[in-house]
Amino acid sequence: MNRRLWMTALLTSFSMLVAGTAVGQQGLKTGKVGVIVQLSGVSGDFGVGVQHAVEIAKQELADNKIIDLQVFYEDHQQQAQLALVGFEKLVDRNDVSVVIANASPVILALAPVAEERKRLVYNFAGVSPKLRSLNRWVINGAALSDRDGSELAQYMVKKLGLKTAAVLHVDDQFGTSVAEYFQNAYKAAGGKIVDVESNPVGALDLRTQLLKIKAANPEALVILNNIPEEGYSVAQAREIGITAKIFSNTFMMDPQNVKAAGAAINGVRGMSLQFDPERSPIAKEFATKFAKKAGRPPAITDVLAYDGARLIGEAMQKVGNDPRAVRDYIVKVKDWPGAIGKINFDAEGNILLDMSQYEFVNGKPVFTNP
Amino acid sequence: MSVEAIIEVRHVCRNYGDLVALDDVSIDIPAGKFTALIGPNGAGKSTLLNVISGFERPVSGQVLLSGKDITDVPGHRRVALGITRSFQDVEIFPTLTVLENVLLGFQDQLGERLCRLLLTPRAVKRQRDQFIAQALAILKTVGIIDERPDEKAGNLSYGQQKLLALARMLPTNAQVFMLDEPGSGLPRPMVAHMGALLQRIAKEHGKSVLLVDHNMELVLEYAERVIVMHHGALLAQGPPDYVRRHPEVIRVYLARIDQDPPERADSGTPTVRTAGHA
Amino acid sequence: MNLFLELLVAGGVAGAKVGVAALGFALIFYTTREMHFAFGAVSVAAAYPCYWVVKALGDGPLGTALGVVAALIAAVLISIALHKYVYLRLRSVLPVVMASLGVSLIVENVIQIVAGPDIQVLSYPALLHIVEIGPVRLRVLEIGVFIGFVIVAVAIDVFLNRTRLGQGLGATMDDPEMAELVGVRTSRMRMGAYAAGAALGAISGIVMLVDTGLKPAIGFTLLLYALIITIMGRGSLRSVAIWSLLFGVIRSLWSWQFSPDLQELAVFALMVSYLIARDSWDRYQFNRIRPISRPASTVGADARA
Amino acid sequence: MRFLMTTFMLMEVYAIVAMSLNLLLGVAGRFSAYEAALMGVGAYTAALLATKLGLSLFWGCVAGAAMGALIGTSFQIAARHMDFFTFNITSFAFQMALYETLLKWRGVTAGSFGIFNIPRPEIAGFSFTTLEAYLAFTTACAAVIMGLLLYIERSTFALALRGLRDGEKALQSLGKNTFALKLKVFAISGAATGFAGGLLAGLTRTIHPSMFFVYLSVILMVFVVAGGRGNLRGSVVAVFLLILLEQAITLIPGIPTSQIGALQRLFYGIVLVAVIMFRPNGLLPESPIFARARFPGIKPVEDGFAFLGRTRSRESTL
């Protein structure tokens, strides 16, 4: 008896789950967006930040009477199978038109399903060049690593004349691909890579790797890591006595990295996306709202997710909920004002963002446009 | 000694570090007889049992089964050759039912072979039904434990578990049944029951039974032949009446009783002293 | 040569950091034979109260001291409660393993819900000061952790071998029934071991808090190393201490000749191979015909009971 | 609908793995914490054969099963004498070592990127590319595997395995080759796990190492313990029930979405502890394989000892 009761309750709840409900409000146009990120586990902090960013975007869109965006979240816990289930659920239950997601393996897993289901996947953080031109249902809203790496290499060799470099990168799809493209570009530009070391995701004690790099004695150290590993890398590199110039990417801008690096951050240079609350009012507003909500300043991925959500919202207001039309609208924007700077896309749906050089002075990044 | 031996132990030595458990022991186990192996604690009885059943390897010496050297045959294969045993700490399968415990005793079960399971399910089933019928009969004949064949063996009383351990050995249809303390801790009527069963197996069915026990009632009243070990060596052997009057045996056993830990005596069975007076 | 020295020292320090937790886990495991999988999660959870107290009272001496006390109390209370109300009711080994895995999941995620998934760090500039010894550069924190580890290891050793209470504890580890017979109150000893082990765990949690920062999921990695070292230590806390250092040094020195990229793989593969080899060797020794030698008896071998 | 289908396939895959873990952990009494990594081995084998050699994923799954059996068996055999605790930990370390191998053997596994564009199988000209077709494929495979496992679970073979769990020595004294028995059960369990990994690869069409992290091993243990150790049916029920409940958590009104993941893990933890403490035998406890009650037709033969044979007339003398 008891068991039957249980089963009934379960089935009922499950059918509710599938049916779902959607209620519009305030007479605004409504649009439905799904977000699939990791919300728990080893790097759950990443997804929670993204969630805050998307919620801020949603609030702004509503406040500005642009669109009432309904956002539904799924947790992929870094597992493609959960991302897949989450995607199907978002489409079946919530009928979302666009899914915002991160991490290259997840995007790779979602791409064929997106095509089958004719929904748009907006990638705001996966940077593997394998994501380039996956299919017409994926928009890459994150600068893929091939560009990132080559611009940094050009800058180092051509501008600064640094002939030898060592690389420390995180062993995930982001770190590996950026490092690989950087190395190729650096060699092509005439430099020499003397050592490449990698560290596992989440490892905060990087001394072993850095000691090896120290022994290789490079002129420059390029750190392509995560948050806050980059900060720890810088601090520990100086701590064990590496005197080489340190270069890095956008992530170094992240306040957590700056905090973890301490005084060692000064003199670190690199190429970064332009998220500069000092100069851009949009960026400043977002940074303030985010800090209030999350209790910390935004990471660059939070900014990208925020811009992505706003852009999607705007597209939905203009062209409705048809994913295809949304895609066409987004890809065609010209110098769209994002918190990250001016946003453009190439024909294949890959974001084009301006990079600028930075150098840390007195614990703050100073940008110099190329 | 013109008895036909089924098992011959030849000059077997075995030690655990400095402790010598078997010191050049040579013993014959007669075929078709109910033999008891006794001796004070630490005399090497269990080690001898382990060596014969292949659970331990001797340092030197040989074990022969019907004249064939089986010293290097692993324990589980000796069952097919004709030796099976029980354990002092019962070692029944507590989470299996009584019936299942007995079923595991059958040899050459088709159901244990994966390919037969998949290819000839009918034959497997037929054989299994046969075994179940057989096992139920065994339980019935052994008695006492046949009431509830679906009871978990772990729920049985200690005495019943000892009977189950015996019942479980029978389907192997071995030539030699070796039992390690089947009578210890049993109430008196149960001891008589056990003794009668073992006697029956030896007398009526021509099996060799080798019993290791401290229970002198079981040993002296039911066994046909008694082997006494002391300090890893053979002390005396012969019919029960001969052994119980053997002066060396009496000396060793009197000494043992003095230092015997008290919990040994709680079996409620006569110890060697009373048996000696009888 | 400098690289070798630097890696050696870095490895030693890393080993000491793991070692504190490993000693705590080993203390619990050897005494109670309970595989307390929630150890890592509890250690990390205990450091959170410390963080909150320091954030509330400031990082002066008083706030810091109260924070440490708060962490110790939290760790000890949670661990003893787990022992008393969960593990002791289960009796056999597999349910304890399962229950403690479950507890580990619960604790980790309760922290995440309460404290959020972000990294929390307390930084004391004094601890980050760099000291140069020959070619090796270390922070004060590292030196402190290393010295602390040595002190803890020696203190445990002395306690076990020289004090009456410690001998009682040792007896409980070796043979609980015998210890009970000679009048050691083994259930108290177990409680004590849980308290002491949990305290050590809490300390390693605090070290993380001031070193690289704390996040809920970090406990599992800590636990995994502590577990493996404990099993390698086979019932002797002295060998746990030595293995911890060796573990750190091997892990670090691997990078002297090979790529640090493979260091985790190497460590786990080495550990698996070592444990398998040790086991096969034991088996061989057990089966081998030895005329005269000492009988082998170790906790590792008979822990099944 | 596709959500249900995808979830259903995932449940099938997990159910196969949970069953094979149960065969080890519950039936044969052998702890194992590397099930997730073994699944990964199967998935990678299948995916590599399918992408590099263009083999049909079905044969990839078969190869994955072989690989799973090979690796599972070699490890278990190498570690077969270990006591419970040592083995327990070694199996955790083995999970980590396998995981690291998937992550670091970049030449083969492509490291943390993983393998993508894994083609779904094509058998005899029929392609199982669409979700519906692949569902049919997965369900057919799962039905066969689960059917086999359930059949084995009710056999004398499983009885011997339970005997192995209760007492290896005693089983040897009854003439069973316990080594061969172990070899077989490790192979069966490893093969089923490897095959399930291959099915998963076809479902996601992308695989990467973090899909097979140690956390999944723990969740699989939750399935086994909650369903009932030793009862394979229980594992299936537990997989379906717990995944449904896990999804149902997302329905609770008012909880912030950022807490859902943590709550789901918390849920698994609570289930594990609660089952162990209050229903230690699980949802569906193990039942006897050969209960007398199931064979009412079988009557005991007449003389229980007749098969032992009779003494011949040769009376021996002392």
Image: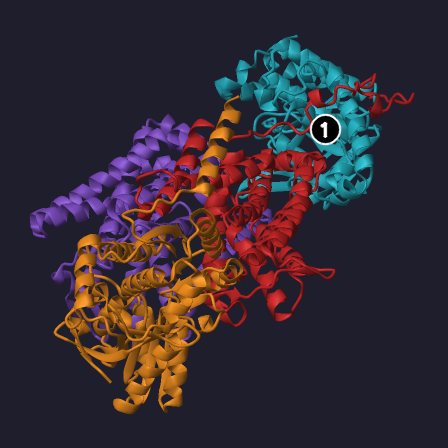
Front position in the image: D67 or D261: D261
Determine the colour of chain C: purple
Q: Residue at x 30, y 65 (%)?
A: A304
**In the rendering, what colour is chain D?**
red
| In the depicted structure, whether residue B45 falls above or below residue A43 | above
x%, y% of residue D185?
A: 64, 45
The residue depicted at 40 percent of the width and 79 percent of the height is A181
Q: Nearer the viewer, residue C62 or A83?
A: A83
The residue that appears at 57% across and 20% down in the rendered structure is B155
- Residue A137, position as x, y percentages in the image: 47, 65
Q: Which chain is cyan?
A: B
On the question of residue D280 being in view, the answer is no
Give the drawing colour for chain A.
orange
From this view, report whether residue B243 is shown above or below residue D142. Answer: above
Looking at the image, can residue A284 be seen? yes
Q: Mark 1 lies on which chain?
A: B
Q: What residue type is labelled 1?
A: Leu
Q: Which of B57 and D286 is in front in this view?
A: D286
| Whole-percent x, y for residue D98 in the image | 50, 59
Q: In this view, does B32 lie to the left or right of C18?
A: right
Name the residue tied to disc 1: B103
